[in-house]
Amino acid sequence: MQIRDATFAIVDLETTGTQATHDRIIEIGAVKMRSGEVVDTMETLVDPQCTISRHITRITGITNADVFDQPQIEEVLPHFLDFLGNAVFVAHYCQFDSSFIDAELQRTGLPPLNNPKLCTLRLARRLLQGLPSKGLSSLITFFDLDPGQRHRALSDAIATQQVLTRLLFRLEEQFEITEVDTLLAFQHSRYEGLHRNQGRQAQIRKKILRELPHGPGVYRMIAPGDKLLYIGKARVLSDRVRSYFAGVEGHPPHIRKMMQKVQDIQWTETATELEALLLESRLIKEHAPRFNRASRTYSRRPFLRLGAIAGSDWITVIEHVRADGALHYGPLANRREAELLAEALVMLYGASPSSFKNPERVGVGLGSARIGGPLTEEGFVQAKAFLHGENSEALSILERRIQHAAKTQAYERAARIRNWLVAMQTIHSRPHFTRVALLERSGAVLYRNEDKIEVHFVVHGCPTVHRVWPCADDVFREALVVFQDQMFQPPDRLKVQQVDAVRLLSAWMFKNRDHIHVLYWTAEKSPSTFECELRSLLEEMHTK
């Protein structure tokens, strides 16, 4: 793609410190640029849920009062991801900003950024070697820019956008760089002593990279002796694998170390990116390759259970989903989110405000239930409606309670209610299909991919079989038969592997939420009716 046709999202963050693992974002500023022109901007303060130090306030001018009652990162991220889209992620010292975004995404149970990344600091170091400092302040002075107030996110993002525009001009003038791929590679160029295994990598470049398919799949990095080094997935295998060989010195240290050992690359093509995502997760857990740092083991995710305990309707936080006649919602990001949701629903619809407790302690134990509370008969109906996305009144009630608590200076209570509200808003923002009770979550998830339509059959929340339509009728019928057979064999209990698949499907649907259609399977539908409706929907989508 030509640089002039590409979209760049220039991002700047203000944070509580320098360590993404435990510091938090307090402000996001972003500028979207296309053809050298600013086409959109984004600016928001973020409540970090921790104290802003005086040192940070002196630098940024942002105080604890400024971020009080501002949206928390869980609310901001969906808007930021929508703003970012598929643009090239640009920042001055890109590793800093992208690491904070990825850390916040991980905390909320979302996958890390997959956008191409461009660092204006790296570009400046290569284009302006005679400049003593390549910091943003120095570049602002060098280019005689006037972006406005410094050390605020949007003004710094505007400054970075202006710097980028001037650097791109120099790149074209001095090096005739007009392609995005060449630009991304250039930022990692001109370091010495990088390719200790040049001969081996030259063979890979010459033979293997040329054979890589231009489609989704899972790739495996192999060391001598067929030792598995790394497993990854890609939407486009050829692009992803080639990126390892472009600007090796720009990769993190552990990836550079891995590339010194790579002797072979193997891959498995899949029809869809979702299949690649599921296969990658399973293979990483099976083989635990040395250079795969994340997702090496199955993690237990909490669920909400809405159902009877000892003759009363309860909402509880559980770890194991069983076909016990109750409704199960999730998996949720973590236990804290689950407990906040359960507590909020008990406070809103419970038998009494003090009824949020451990069921075991009141003699009504339920297997893996950790904490929860009984609901009134009407409260059960309202809680179910909220979890299904059919009742937003709960959000309004909590907003009014926050305002009342603040007016009466009950700030601790206001903060507690706000935590409930954020957890409920997070759930409320998810695609409807992922909010339906898990064992009722069956049907076909349809996703348009250029001139094809991906069909992902889901049974009791788990993706089971996948097809790309149009396809041969016997191939499509085979998938329908598998789907229907599994529909009538509900599991007694979900295994950790199935929960992981549910989680991956939910994350994928959130990422692609604006391009997805869902056809639900209900008990009232016969297999032939479902098939007829599915084929009709596919024809309708295909002709649009």
Image (tube, rainbow, N blue to C red):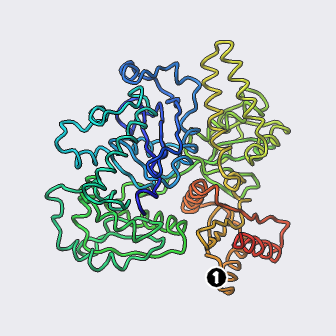
* Rendering quarter of residue 151: top left
User: Is 64 left, or right, of 453 in this rendering?
Assistant: left
Outermost residue, front direction? 173
Quadrant location of the N terminus? Answer: bottom left
Three-letter code, disc 1: Cys
Residue 158: x %, y % from top left? 43, 37
| Disc 1 crowd, CA 10 A, few/some/many (<14, 14-19, 20+) | few
Residue 344: x %, y % from top left? 69, 33
Residue 48: x %, y % from top left? 49, 30
* Rendering quarter of residue 370: top right
Would you place residue 516 above or below residue 120 in this image?
A: below
Quadrant location of the C terminus? Answer: bottom right
Outermost residue, top direction? 408
- Find disc 1 in the rendering and name its residue: 471
At horizontal 21% and vertical 36% (from top left) the residue drawn is: 133
At horizontal 59% and vertical 57% (from top left) the residue drawn is: 512
Q: Nearer the viewer, residue 115 or 343?
A: 115
Q: Nearer the viewer, residue 92 or 365?
A: 92
Residue 463: x %, y % from top left? 62, 66
Q: Nearer the viewer, residue 225 or 250?
A: 250
Please tell me how many numbered marks the rendered image carries: 1
Helix, strand or loop at label 1? It is loop
At horizontal 61% and vertical 17% (from top left) the residue drawn is: 411
At horizontal 45% and vertical 22% (from top left) the residue drawn is: 62
* Rendering quarter of residue 166: top left
User: Is 297 left, or right, of 417 in this rendering?
Assistant: left
